Amino acid sequence: MQILLQSFTKILIPGIKVTIPLTLASFALGFAIALFLALVQVARVPVLSKFARIYIWIFRGTPLLVQLFIIFFGLPSVGIILDAFPSAVIAFGMNLGAYNAEVLRSAIQAVPVGQSEAAALIGMSYPQTMIHIVLPQAFPIAFPPLFNSLIGLVKDTSLASSITVIELFTTAQQIAARTFEPFALYCEAAVIYLMICTLLTWLQAWLEKKMVWRTPEDQLTG
Amino acid sequence: MLEVRELRKSFGNNEVIKGIDLDVNDGEVVAVIGPSGSGKTTMLRCISFLEKADHGMIRLDEHQSDIVTISKKQIHEMRMHMGFVFQAFNLFANKTALGNVMAPLTIARRMNTDRAREMAMGLLKKVGMDQRARYYPGQLSGGQQQRVAIARALASGPSVVLFDEPTSALDPELTGEVLDVMKQLAAEGTTMVVVTHEMQFAREAANKVVFMDNGVIWEQGEAGAFFEQPKTERALQFLRKQ
Ligand SMILES: Nc1ncnc2c1ncn2[C@@H]1O[C@H](COP(=O)(O)OP(=O)(O)OP(=O)(O)O)[C@@H](O)[C@H]1O
Ligand SMILES: [Mg+2]
């Protein structure tokens, strides 16, 4: 009991200081990659859409842990040496990019074609149509699965412990090794992950409510 | 003035438009009527380049081009002088009524926001929707959405406005408000091509009627004379069924 209380802040702090930034940075990179891969496919950009298919094929078809090892332990042998944290961000980001590319692509394709036709007819260019009409409507469609992948990522960041990133799970491992209380400490780590994911689930519900195009009744006139 | 010559369009082996000539003079209201599947929508979609035609020439005021080899730039140029009203309204779901009418001005024409807002409010007033400027499409009835869509189509000051069955998706009690707006536009001298099943509207508001069947225009002429005494057996048959 004593150990649980003493170790709680010790695990929580790297949880907040490393796991959360790692999650957010990886997600941001993954989102940027996903958007790029989705757009070149939807726009059928010649070489790039082919590249996107191959990229998605590779990154969805190989284990995340293996990708992590290739980037951190493998790349130095071809002269590319990265710190553990950026390695993790790149591996998670590239992996997530592949999954979320499909999410975004199907969301973009779910926007009724009449919306882009109307945009084209009033003289909007293709990029304008995407930016002002299609993407804003695709985003709420993509939001629940994107958020799912964010919650999945929070948990997957524990894999970074295997490439020496000192995050929440690594800290729990270290304390467990020192105190010989693996059961208590790993359960404690699990609880902290659960807390983070619970907060995110609440955030998701709150954001989803905000994402409807309605002017509130009391602001409709005037 | 809109002029279309020798328009042809096939989907696979199915020839849907079989060499159509269409003339619309300034200030004219042309009603396009004909049975379902006769190619009316396809014709409008070819004229507005939503569908790539197989053959034909198009001229809108001083702009003229082969409809097949036309460049992207020319398409853009012509679309800036056309308005299009869809059967399904197709208002931008992520924009308010006002935002929808401003979009052609601020986004496509890069007009400054204040002027665009003023113009857009004027157009919404014209279609009786100024009180609903801040509503999103999801908060409007079908008839109201279609009136906003008409305002949007008018925003760029088009030489011709193409309507594809603007009241067909509406509950019967809502068609009146949309047809009233269209009659008002007709009376003001707006050049319009209206594909419609509303014979009453065609009779009252159109100067000219085009009768299409099976991808061919069988008759086009003065509206009164057409309804009085159609020249072809097909048109007669069609009118009897209405
Ligand atoms: N995208 C398409 N692909 C294949 N065939 C099509 C396509 N669009 C239309 N057609 C065919 O072209 C023909 C003409 O269709 P169109 O929609 O132009 O008729 P319409 O006169 O507008 O009919 P309605 O009064 O029912 O709206 C129909 O036989 C239809 O099946
Ligand atoms: Mg039709």
Image (cartoon, coloured by chain):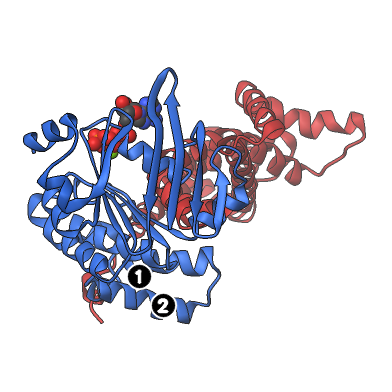
Instruction: Please name the color used to draw chain B.
Output: blue
Is tag 2's residue or tag 1's residue first in the polypeptide sequence?
Answer: 1
Side of A184 where B190 appears, left or right? left
Residue on which the image places disc 2: B117
Identify the disc placed on residue A146.
none
Q: Mark 1 belongs to which subunit?
A: B
Tell me the element at label 2.
helix
Residue on which the image places disc 1: B98
Instruction: Please name the color used to draw chain A.
Output: red
Find residue B220 and report its horizontal and vertical position in percent.
Answer: 28, 44
Which quadrant does ligand 2 occupy? top left
Indicate whether A129 appears above or below B131. above
Find residue B212 and report its horizontal and vertical position in percent.
Answer: 27, 36
Indicate whether B59 appears above or below B150. above
Q: Mark 2 belongs to which subunit?
A: B
Please, what is the three-letter code of the amino acid marked with disc 1?
Leu
Tell me the element at label 1.
helix
* Count of labels in the image: 2
Q: Residue furthest top?
A: B13
In front here: B98 or B184? B184
Question: Which image quarter: residue B197?
Answer: top left
Residue at 51% in and 31% down: B54
Find residue B207 and report its horizontal and vertical position in percent.
Answer: 24, 57
Find residue A11 and report its horizontal and vertical position in percent.
Answer: 58, 49
